[in-house]
Image: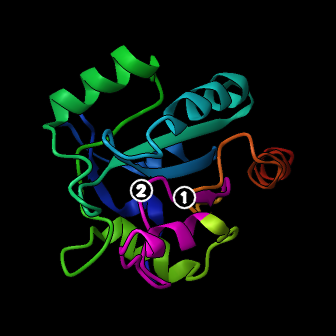
Amino acid sequence: MSQSVYDIPVKTIAGQDITLNQYTGKVLLLVNVASKCGLTPQYEGLQKLYKEKKDQGLEILGFPANNFLAQEPGSDAEIQEFCSLNYQVNFPLFSKISVAGEDKHPLYQTLTQAIPERIGEGPWWKDLVDYGLTPNEPPEVLWNFEKFLINKKGEVVARFAPDITADDPRIVDAINAELAK
C-alpha cells in the first residue's frame, strides 16, 4: 500500500478536516454509500452491525459518493438528515467524495490499489449488465456499497462486492477474525 489509510486527509460530514488516525487500533469497515440506490436499505444492516460490534472495536465509516447514476445528489447536510431520519445511522459519515474515475479521492486510490479484486461478485453484477449498465472493472469500485475491511494496524485486509450485506457470514467472519487479533 502506497500510503497508510490513517494519514489520508478526509472531511467529516460536518465539515471538519481530519485523518483516520483517530481510529488507530480499531477494525474499520469503509463503505461508499448513496441515498437513492437500490442498495440503500443496506444502511439498516450496517447500523445494526455497528451497534452490535462497536464496543468490541469496530467502526463503520460511510463515504457518500455520487459516482453511480447520480444516486447521491444531496448536500452533506441532506445526506446526514436522510441517514438519521430513515435509518437512524449513528456511525461516522464523511463529506461526499469521488470513489472512481479521474477525480477519485486518495483514500479510494489507496484502498483499490491495496486489494484490486472484490469478494462476492454474484448475480447482482449481471443484473447491472442486463439493465444496460456498464459496471466498473477491478480495481475500480464496482458500485455503491462496496466495502473495505481495515485491520487494527491500518492495513486493507478484505474487499466485498456491493451486494454482500453487513450480515453476510463472509463479512461477519472476517470482522470477527480481525477483532479477535
Q: Quadrant of residue 118?
A: bottom right
In terms of depth relative to the viewer, which is nearer, 180 or 36?
A: 36
Q: Is residue 62 above or below residue 3?
A: above
Q: Which residue is located at x 74 percent, y 52 percent?
A: 171
Instruction: Name the secondary structure under disc 1.
Output: loop
Q: Quadrant of residue 55?
A: top right
Q: Which residue is located at x 23 percent, y 55 percent?
A: 66
Circles 1, 2 touching at the beta carbon (< 8 Å): yes
Q: Is residue 55 visible?
A: yes
* Residue range of the region highlighted in magenta in the rendering: 124-152
Q: Which residue is located at x 83 percent, y 49 percent?
A: 169
Magenta residue check for 29: no
The residue tagged 1 is: 162
| Side of 78 relative to 80 (left or right) | left
Q: Position of residue 39 (x, y in %)?
A: 48, 46
Q: Which mark is residue 12?
A: none
In terms of depth relative to the viewer, which is nearer, 158 or 87?
A: 87
Amino acid type, callout 2:
Asn
Q: Is residue 148 above or below residue 17?
A: below
Q: Earlier in the sequence, mark 1 or mark 2?
A: 2
| Residue furthest to the left | 75
The residue tagged 2 is: 144
Q: Is residue 155 visible?
A: no
